[in-house]
């Protein structure tokens, strides 16, 4: 069982927006602005999409955005495109004994 | 161009040992914390261990402590993971990744299969 809870799957049609949630606790997501999001296509390495809750690395489309409220972080993808179909994982700092935790992952299907 | 290239994976029997390596290219390796992250077949990502730039700080996932050892050689731009007492549940692709708070570059991974 992963430390952070994500929905197993989400789906949307091209052009629509979707949001993936990442629910933790007051010991991880709720306490630190160190939530990141990763995109992983089948057979490929993860790619950083969002860091520090809402910042985008250079080269990542502005269709990707992140936010946090309480113990839940969210990744929103607007203007869905076929290439967005992938697995998405959240990652958070969890304090000085557990250190780092991932969410269980969410499979995004573009219909 | 930043590149991370893992090697050392393969088939090992339960109880055996394996040493993974990751060679870094295109950045000042000695300035970055490095990580190992693994992914069992069909499963999610799992953080394994991190080591600071000068090896002053080393962190492990609780479930792995005592069996795995992370280390680095900055002169060789290399990261290592020594894995002992391997179990079937350690079967996974092992990735090395750069950076502490948000690993930003990842290698393509090396597959470790633990099976008799």
Image (tube, coloured by chain):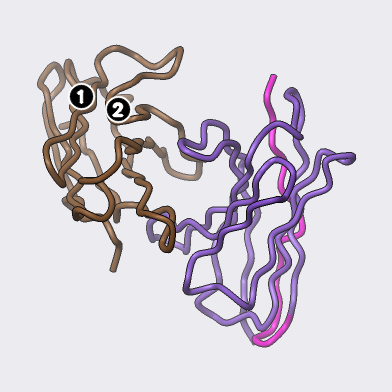
Q: Mark 2–mark 1 contact, CB under 8 Å?
A: yes
Q: Position of residue A38 (x, y in %)?
A: 38, 37
Q: Which residue corresponds to mark 1? A: A77
Which residue occupies the foreground of this view, B85 or B108? B85
Judge the density around disc 1: few (<14), some (14-19), many (≥20) Cα neighbours within 10 Å: many
Secondary structure, mark 2, is helix
The colour of chain B is: purple
Q: Quadrant of residue B98?
A: top right
Left or right placement of residue B67 versus residue A7 in this view? right
Which residue occupies the foreground of this view, A50 or B58? B58
Q: Quadrant of the C terminus of chain B?
A: bottom right
Q: Residue at x 65, y 54 (%)?
A: B110
From what the image shows, is residue A65 above or below residue B23? above
What is the number of callouts on the image? Answer: 2
Left or right placement of residue A19 versus residue B115 in this view? left
Please state the extent of the stretch shown in magenta in the rendering: B1-16
Which mark is drawn over residue A34? none
N-term mark: 2 or 1? 1
Q: Which residue corresponds to mark 2? A: A84
Chain of the residue on which disc 1 is drawn: A
Q: Residue at x 71, y 47 (%)?
A: B6
Magenta span contains residue B6: yes
The colour of chain A is: brown
Chain of the residue on which disc 2 is drawn: A
From what the image shows, is residue A39 above or below residue B45? above
């Amino acid at each position: 069982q992963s430390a952070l809870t994500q929905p197993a799957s989400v789906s949307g049609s091209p052009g629509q927006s979707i949001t993936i949630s990442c629910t933790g606790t007051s010991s991880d997501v709720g306490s630190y602005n160190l939530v990141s999001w990763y995109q992983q296509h089948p057979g490929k390495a993860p790619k950083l999409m969002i860091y520090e809750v809402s910042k985008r690395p250079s080269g990542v489309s502005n269709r990707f955005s992140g936010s946090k409220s309480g113990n839940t972080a969210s990744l929103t993808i607007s203007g869905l495109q076929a290439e967005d179909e992938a697995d998405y994982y959240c990652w958070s700092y969890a304090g000085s004994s557990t250190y780092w935790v991932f969410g269980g992952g969410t499979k995004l299907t573009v219909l | 161009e930043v590149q991370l290239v893992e090697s050392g994976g393969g088939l090992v029997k339960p109880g055996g040992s394996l040493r993974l390596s990751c060679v870094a290219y295109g950045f000042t390796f000695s300035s970055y914390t490095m990580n190992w992250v693994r992914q069992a077949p069909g499963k999610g990502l799992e953080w394994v261990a991190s080591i600071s730039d000068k090896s002053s700080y080393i962190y492990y996932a609780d479930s792995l402590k005592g069996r795995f050892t992370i280390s680095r050689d900055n002169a060789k731009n290399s990261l290592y993971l020594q894995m002992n007492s391997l179990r079937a549940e350690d079967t996974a692709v092992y990735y090395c990744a750069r950076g502490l708070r948000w690993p930003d570059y990842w290698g393509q991974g090396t597959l470790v299969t633990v099976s008799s």
